[in-house]
Amino acid sequence: MAQMRVLAAVLMAALGLAAARAGAQTPGTPMGGAAPMGGMAMGHGMDEKLPPAGPLKVSFGDKTAEWTPATLAALPHRTLTVFNEHLKANQTFTGVLLMDLLTPLGVPAKQHGKDLRLYLVAEGSDGYKAVYSVAEVNPDLHEGTVIVADGLEGKPLPGGALQMVAAGEKRPARWVRSLAAVRVLAVE
């Protein structure tokens, strides 16, 4: 129970810090001023054109790694079927556990104490941003699965894009299409 309170406090602090870093915004626009749902207009499908993402840059401290669909292909993949509230349909994504991209950079796989201060900001090529505590993407602490998807319904994502997808979300508000960057930071 105490760990849940710490996790909730870390998440709330991370959200506040991320909002403070984003600066002033136009009312009604999400952090970063991007369109809702990572460029997905409400009620529309995923056919909209997004700026090309290029390689995914993942960073923690002074360490950085770059990933493309070709380099991700060599890693173990998971299949994740989730309900997309906007499309009113199940979707089946394939991809790599986000945690598998974070641990080689030094993010602890078994988080304790101060490790629970870590959070990440995922950003799409359109500037859309979503915040997660690292504990939320860590299968050691959280039941929800978060992947960097490179496939949808058995086919590569259009344009070689990558997408962050999370199971257990009531709607895909924190899914990030055309994923360009994931930065791991710590609450001060």
Image (spheres, rainbow, N blue to C red):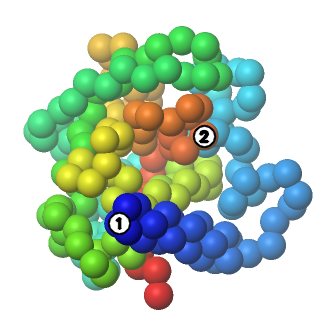
Label 1 and label 2: CA atoms lie apart by 26 Å
- Name which of mark 1 and mark 2 comes first in the sequence: 1
Q: Which residue is identified by label 2? A: 173
Which residue does the numbered mark 1 point to in the structure image? 3
Instruction: Name which residue lies at 54% across and 12% down.
Output: 89
Instruction: State the residue lying farthest toward the right.
Output: 27
Name the side, left or right, on which 147 lies relative to 132: left
Quadrant hosting residue 59: bottom left
Q: Residue furthest front?
A: 1
Vertical order, 109 against 16 (above or below): above
> Quick one: 38 or 51, which is closer to the camera?
38
Instruction: Out of 184 and 135, give the one closest to the viewer.
Output: 135
The image quarter containing residue 91 is top left
Q: Position of residue 40 (x, y in %)?
A: 66, 33
Kind of residue at badge 2? Ala
Query: Which residue does the image show at 26% across and 24% down from the upper left?
Result: 79
Q: Determine whether 11 is above or below 100 in the image.
A: below
* x 88%, y 58%: residue: 27
Q: How far from the left and from the top, in percent, is residue 168? A: 44, 34
Closer to the eye: label 1 or 2: 1
Q: Nearer the viewer, residue 131 or 116?
A: 116
| Quarter of the figure with residue 161 | top left
Q: Position of residue 115 (x, y in %)?
A: 29, 75
